[in-house]
Image (tube, rainbow, N blue to C red):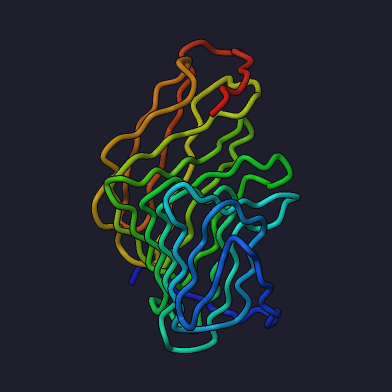
Amino acid sequence: MCGLLAVALAVLAPRPAFAACDQTGSTVNCTGTTTNYNAGSQGGVTFTVQPGATIQGVGGTSAFSLTNPTFSADRLINNGTIDGLVDIVSSVPGVDSFTNNGVLKITDPLTNLTSHSLFGTDFTQSSSGTFMARVDSAGFNDSLLVNSATLAGRLIIVVQPGLYTSANTYTIITSTNTIVGAFDSASVTSPFFTLSLSTCACNLDATLTPICKFWSLPIRSL
């Protein structure tokens, strides 16, 4: 264990019914596009974002949120796109899991650069998965805050507009347990930076160094 884990149960919220995310017993299948999906409070459920489907966070609200007050595992499997924050509150560390086989990103301009909140969740990204993390010139970034991380697939650093005068190091993953594996590839959306990754047991950092100082950078569309 690499640190103490604080787990808090959120206020239990009613689970809304979304046409694009249909639940049958302990199985939820998301097809089409769903906005700000709040799964409420439940345990022992498997949520699958099907290929071609999108769960999207708008207005600064999480794309997917869930509270598990039980010891029965909840599983989130992304085979499509999750565009927004993912928040899972677990009853105990490691009971829940999130497998990213698709794309995990944030494009909502009202969502601050912050962490996907997965304190008690085991995160796995497969070779087909992509994690896109925004970074800015003030040193803020999107990241994963997890119980454990097993990595493969792609990491894409999405540079936000700003004035970058020197190298910045961003913590992309913070894990309670030692990180297993590594991203198969890592890239940055701007050609005006070099990118390097470093892993120290429970943290994975990305250092972005501008090739040309004082370069004011527009964001590339993704």
Camera-side residue: 104 or 159?
Answer: 104
Camera-side residue: 192 or 103?
Answer: 103
- Outermost top residue: 212
Camera-side residue: 203 or 99?
Answer: 99
- Outermost bottom residue: 70
5 vs 202: above or below: below
Residue drawn at (65%, 66%) of the image: 18
167 vs 25: above or below: above
Q: Is residue 8 left or right of residue 123?
A: right
Image coordinates of residue 79 in percent, x first then y, are: 40, 53
Residue drawn at (60%, 72%) of the image: 39
Camera-side residue: 15 or 162?
Answer: 15
Image coordinates of residue 12 in percent, x first then y, are: 68, 82
Image coordinates of residue 125 in percent, x first then y, are: 34, 53
* Quadrant in which residue 64 is drawn: bottom right
* Quadrant in which residue 77 is drawn: bottom left
Q: Quadrant of the N terminus?
A: bottom left
Image coordinates of residue 167 in percent, x first then y, are: 49, 26
* Quadrant in which residue 44 is drawn: bottom left
Residue drawn at (27%, 46%) of the image: 127
180 vs 17: above or below: above
Query: How many discs mark residues in the rendered view?
Result: 0
Q: Is residue 112 left or right of residue 169?
A: right
Residue drawn at (35%, 47%) of the image: 129
